Amino acid sequence: MDRLLIAEAAEEEYTESLKWYAERSLRAAERFDAAFEQALNSIAAHPDRYPLCDDRHRFYLLKGYPFQIIYRRASERQWLVVAVAHTTRRPGYWRYR
């Protein structure tokens, strides 16, 4: 299995989104967290499985939530999550990370 790293900006986006859900519903926040963890495990196990969104970034649509995890290859055996991006807000803002 490849190693999956999370950029600081992506970690902040995840934390901010988790907080938003927690302020509205603890249950929704728990489900968001579980969906995020499942996504990271799936990406780490099969990083090439998910579609390209440009020439170097791939994305995973978070099940049940309007977010996508944007990631790219960092080295031969490492991948970097560069964004936890809302699917309709500020498209492509993460491209130069």
Image (cartoon, rainbow, N blue to C red):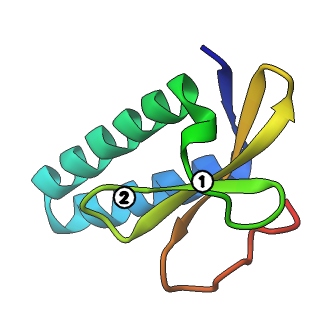
Give the structural element (helix, strand or loop) at label 1.
helix
Tell me which label, 1 or 2, sits earlier in the chain: 1
Q: Residue beneath label 1, please?
A: 12
Mark 1: which amino acid?
Glu
Which quadrant of the structure image shows residue 34? top left
Q: Horizontally, is 19 left or right of 73 in the view?
A: left
On screen, residue 79 above or below 97: above
Rendered location of residue 65, percent (x, y): 30, 65
- Left or right placement of residue 35 versus residue 17 in this view: left
Circle 2 packing at 10 Å, graded few (<14), some (14-19), many (20+), is some
Name the residue located 29 percent from the left edge and 56 percent from the top edge.
63
Residue shown at the point (67%, 59%) measured from the top left? 52
Q: Horizontal placement of 68 versus 25: left or right?
A: right
Quadrant of the snapshot with the N terminus:
top right
**Residue at disc 2, secondary structure:** helix
Q: Residue shown at 48%/52% (left/top)? A: 15
The amino acid beneath tag 2 is Lys
Quarter holding the C terminus is: bottom right
Q: Which residue is mark 2?
A: 19
Would you place residue 87 above or below residue 27 in this image? below
Q: Residue sitting at 73 percent across and 39 percent down? A: 80
